[in-house]
Amino acid sequence: MGKLILLVIVLLGVGMAVPNTRDKMLVAAAPLMDKFKAKLVPMRLDAMADQVAALVNDGEGYPPQWEHWLQADFTGAPEDPWGNVYYIEKDRNGFTVGSSGPDGVPRTPDDITRKRRLGN
C-alpha cells in the first residue's frame, strides 16, 4: 500500500512538471476544487451577514461603501474563493449577502447566498 501511494505521488509530481500535462490535470481537477470552495463560502457568508445585521440592529446602518467595509472591517476575506468580491442586496425586510460562485456572474443559479430579515 505504501509503495502505491509513493507511486501516485511521483506520478503526480512528474505530471505537474510537464506543462501540457499540468494544464490537463488542473482542468480535470476544477470541478472538485469548485465543490471544495463552495463548502467554505456559506460559513463566510454567515459571518458576514451576522456582522452586517449587528451594525444595522445597533443603529449604525448598512456599510455605505460595501467593498471598503469588506476590506477594512469584515473579519474574513473580501473575495470569495473564485476571486469575486462578495455582494449585498438590500430590501425592505432585510438583506442578502452573496458569492457569485464559480461562474463569477452575480444573480445566476450557481450563486451562494445568505438572507437576513431585520426588525420584527
Image: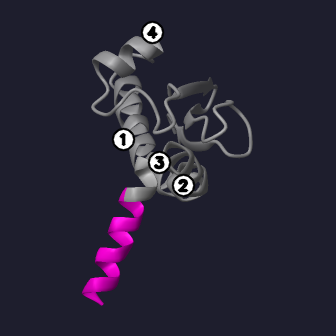
What's the amino acid at mark 2? Answer: Met
- Residue hosting label 3: 18
Count neighbours of disc 1 (C-alpha within 10 A) and say few if under 14, some if 14 to 19, many if 20 or more.
Answer: some
* Magenta residues, start to end: 1-13
Count neighbours of disc 3 (C-alpha within 10 A) and say few if under 14, some if 14 to 19, many if 20 or more.
Answer: few
Real-space Cα separation, disc 1 to disc 4, in angstroms: 18 Å
Q: Earlier in the sequence, mark 1 or mark 4?
A: 1
What's the amino acid at mark 4? Answer: Gln
Under tag 3, what secondary structure?
loop
At x 54%, y 59%, the residue is 32
Q: Tell me, for residue 65, which label it has, or none.
A: 4
- Residue hosting label 1: 47
Choose top left, top right, bottom left or bottom right for residue 1.
Answer: bottom left
Nearer to us: label 2 or label 1 = 2
Q: In this view, does 89 lie above or below 28?
A: above
- Residue hosting label 2: 25
Q: Can residue 40 be seen?
A: no
Real-space Cα separation, disc 2 to disc 1, in angstroms: 34 Å
At x 50%, y 49%, the residue is 22
Real-space Cα separation, disc 3 to disc 4, in angstroms: 45 Å
**In this rendering, position of residue 52 left or right of residue 29:** left
What's the amino acid at mark 3? Answer: Val
**In this rendering, position of residue 30 left or right of residue 68:** right
The question of residue 113 being in magenta is answered with no
